[in-house]
Amino acid sequence: LLEITMTDGVDRLTKTRVAPPLRKDFRNFNEFEETLKERMKHFIHYMVDGCNVVDKIHARLMPTPLLSCVIDDCIEKGLDVSNGGARYNFTSPQAVGIANLADSLFVLKEFVFDEQNVSFEELNNILDSNFEGNERLRQKVLNLYPKFGNDIDEVDLIAAKWAEEYCRLVFDNVNPRGGSYQPGLYSVSSHVPLGLVVGATPDGRLAKEPLADGGISPMRGRDRNGPTAVLKSVSKLPLILATNGTLLNLKFHPSIFRT
């Protein structure tokens, strides 16, 4: 979503249009965020349509009678779990890359719009070329600007804002079984293949590199204030809204546990 908001709907890696044009001349950070919200609404709509089509096909062509035998109310209703037999009928999509989004938005706000180190158009061109010839700039945005996971409100609250936006937009939908949509914030391992289709991002991540793991974990190597700071950053997210669950990975060097 960040990428196609920056490129006005063009996939950075394939150069193909994947969304209708909205705008590409942003005068300030607020205008960028407003357009990002429009993009999020647009794609959540398509995500829901896709999920609902799959659900209908599963109910008609791929029922699961064995599974239905051990799910409450299916036998009593005489309905397969894929056709509304279960007592609870949630559809639960996940958001991936919250840390990358927050880190990138902070760089856009500070480095581009507030400090005007480069223009928005210049940064877009740099990202199109995967920072080639601009390693000094990449290291600057990567290391000199706060990142999610260090208990720094400036960037943590950006993550919280957009996690809440995602969750509330997901809640507004209903699936074919009459069940509600329940958002989650976790990737398991999908941050690796999803990263392969995302170009370079303003946070200093190179094209095709994995996105942040876990779902609400900081981007690898960017949490430098210890595990307690990570927990404090994560506690600022609207976790009560992520009703399908969240996933935080805390990683420690083995030497910590030797004594």
Image (cartoon, rainbow, N blue to C red):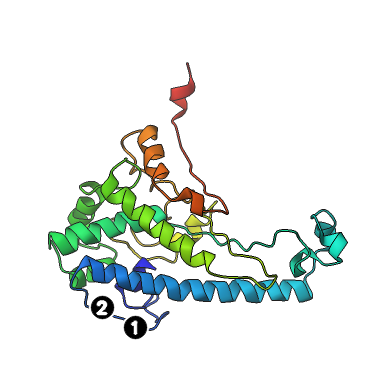
Q: Position of residue 95 (x, y in %)?
A: 48, 59
Q: Are marks 2 and 1 in contact (CB under 8 Å)?
A: yes
Please give left or right for residue 86 compared with residue 117 in the image: right
Label at residue 21: 1
Question: Element at badge 1?
Answer: loop
For the residue pair 191 and 38, the one nearer the viewer reads as 38
Residue under label 2? 24
Label at residue 150: none
Q: Position of residue 107 (x, y in %)?
A: 24, 57
Please give left or right for residue 142 compared with residue 54 in the image: left
Please give left or right for residue 186 compared with residue 7 in the image: right
Q: Relative to 26, does residue 93 appear above or below in the rendering?
A: above
* CA gap, disc 2 and disc 1: 8 Å
Residue drawn at the location 28% of the way across and 43% of the way down: 152
Question: Element at badge 2?
Answer: loop
Q: Is residue 249 visible?
A: yes
Sort mark 2 into few (<14), some (14-19) or many (20+) by Cα contacts within 10 Å.
Answer: some
Q: Position of residue 39 (x, y in %)?
A: 39, 73
Q: Relative to 76, does residue 61 appear above or below in the rendering?
A: below
Residue drawn at the location 38% of the way across and 38% of the way down: 232
Q: Is residue 185 visible?
A: no
Mark 1 belongs to which amino acid?
Pro
Q: Quadrant of the N terminus?
A: bottom left
Q: On the image, which quarter does residue 221 sit in?
A: top left
For the residue pair 47 and 237, the one nearer the viewer reads as 237
Q: Residue furthest top?
A: 259
Sort mark 1 into few (<14), some (14-19) or many (20+) by Cα contacts within 10 Å.
Answer: few
Mark 2 belongs to which amino acid?
Lys
Residue drawn at the location 22% of the way across and 53% of the way down: 141
